Image: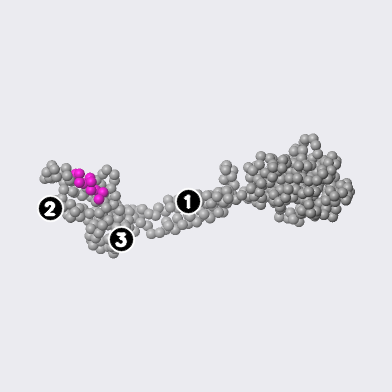
Amino acid sequence: MDLHDYVRILRKNWILILIVVVGVAGGAGYAALQHPKYNASTQLYVSVRTEGAATGDLVQGQTFARQMVTSYADIVGTALILAPVIQKLNLDTTSAQLAKQVTATTPLNTVLIDISVVDGDADRAAKIANAVAVSFTDAIQSTLEKPTGGNNSLVQVTVTEPAAAPAAPSSPNIPLTLALGAVLGLALGLGIAVLRTMLDTRVHTLHDLEAITSKPVLGGIAKDPDAAKRPLIVHADPRGPRAESFRALRTNLQFLAVDDGPRVFVVSSAGPGEGKSTTAANLAIALAETGARVALIDGDLRLPRVADYMGIEGGVGLTDVLIGRIDVADALQKWGGSNLFVLTSGRIPPNPSELLGSTAMDQVLAPLGDYFDYVLIDAPPLLLVTDAAVLGKKARGVILVSASGETRKQELTGAIRTLETAGVDLLGVVATKLPTKGPDSYGYGSYTYGMTHSTTGEITTVQTTGNGKSQKRRKRATA
């Protein structure tokens, strides 16, 4: 994924990321508000007495101190050392409990012992540390390492740095804890968002389509909640942004149709409900607006929709022509005031694929391709039946419709593979149901267009912005 993908993930999942950040930071804040702990430290130096010692004793004592300093550190946490501390300071605890507060370490290759004590009270932590140091010194010199015969111990323990009451608690570090909580929450939120995006196999943006196929993206149609009520948006709202997007699709299709030969195109999709029929109908109306002769054929002989969308009678249509009951010229119905003619599906046959792949279908398309500038065939979904691939062999190619947020990438890939296997050209892809808000939103750009009202002499200029909202401005027309 590139930087644009990560930005889109951030915009799309910012609420999730914010919740995780707040949650982790809140937990860190709660931990930071717990009782503070103070750390007091003292340091001991282990050496060998040289006063009055024979040479052999001196060497033996030095070697012994170096070898045993690690073992000395382990003794610090025992009852031998801690019991006198508890008695001296009158602590309400046991040796085992106090041992959890005391830590003794020895720096590498030294004869030093560092003793640290953690306690909720700063003064008490320092007192315990100093008392442990005194108790340890007494135990080593008077008990553990005292020679027989009453002589002084060759090992001497000296406190080099007494413990002092710390001015600030060692834990929790509130700023650091909150910062780590925020960073951890952000990382966790981003990780969840990226994983969620990677597991989402649906097509959302034009960028997703470009990643699946090298064929051009011919256009993007925004989602319309009222699409079921007004499927023919180019006719119902000719100045709306969605109508303009179909005109942009028309322009791109005209660039694809520059070669000689019949301009017969099949419109299909990977699965049902992706908007192929409304795309074919609105594209046909947009093409007819330019003065071109356009034929719209309902080639979906299983679940036809064109007749309902166009508001015409669908009892007689393509199936009647294919079985020879009626001539194609008589089955075509003129629609609107432009040169748009519609051939409905007719009655649903028991053998749609055989009819669409028959020689009779060739005989229908041949004269239509010669007479009309554009012939658009609405075909069934590619992954359900073979009808679209059969029709694609008889046309210039297939225009594949993909619904944002609904079509899965593997389904679109499977539809493209079906066309490749059948030897049918994929001319391009059209994205439908694109969101108009949010990170996956589809912008129409910015454009203006004018419409003159002859009765008032005013010109209404409609300025449409990327968010799909239109602003109307009126001015008096002048001669």
In this view, the residue in front, 44 or 150, is: 150
* Residue at x-position 75% and y-position 48%: 387
Q: Amino acid at mark 3?
A: Gln
Q: Nearer the viewer, mark 1 or mark 2?
A: 2
Q: Position of residue 403 (x, y in %)?
A: 68, 50
Q: Residues within 10 Å of mark 3 (few under 14, many from 20)?
A: few
In this view, the residue in front, 331 or 107, is: 331
Which is nearer the N-term, disc 1 or disc 2?
2
| Side of 299 where 179 appears, left or right | left
Q: Residues within 10 Å of mark 1 (few under 14, many from 20)?
A: some
Q: Main secondary structure of the magenta part?
A: helix
* Residue at x-position 25% and y-position 50%: 71
* Residue at x-position 73% and y-position 41%: 424
Mark 2 secondary-structure assignment: loop
Residue underneath mark 1: 184
Does the residue at mark 1 contact the one at mark 2 (Cβ under 8 Å)? no
Residue 260 figure quarter = top right
Visible residue check, residue 276? no
Q: Position of residue 421 (x, y in %)?
A: 69, 42
Which is nearer the N-term, disc 2 or disc 3?
3
Residue underneath mark 3: 97
Q: Nearer the viewer, mark 2 or mark 3?
A: 2
User: What is the span of residues highlighted in magenta in the rendered image?
Assistant: 62-71
* Residue at x-position 25% and y-position 47%: 112
Which is nearer the N-term, disc 3 or disc 1?
3
Residue underneath mark 2: 148
Does the residue at mark 3 contact the one at mark 1 (Cβ under 8 Å)? no
Per the model, the C-alpha gap separating discs 1 and 2 is 60 Å
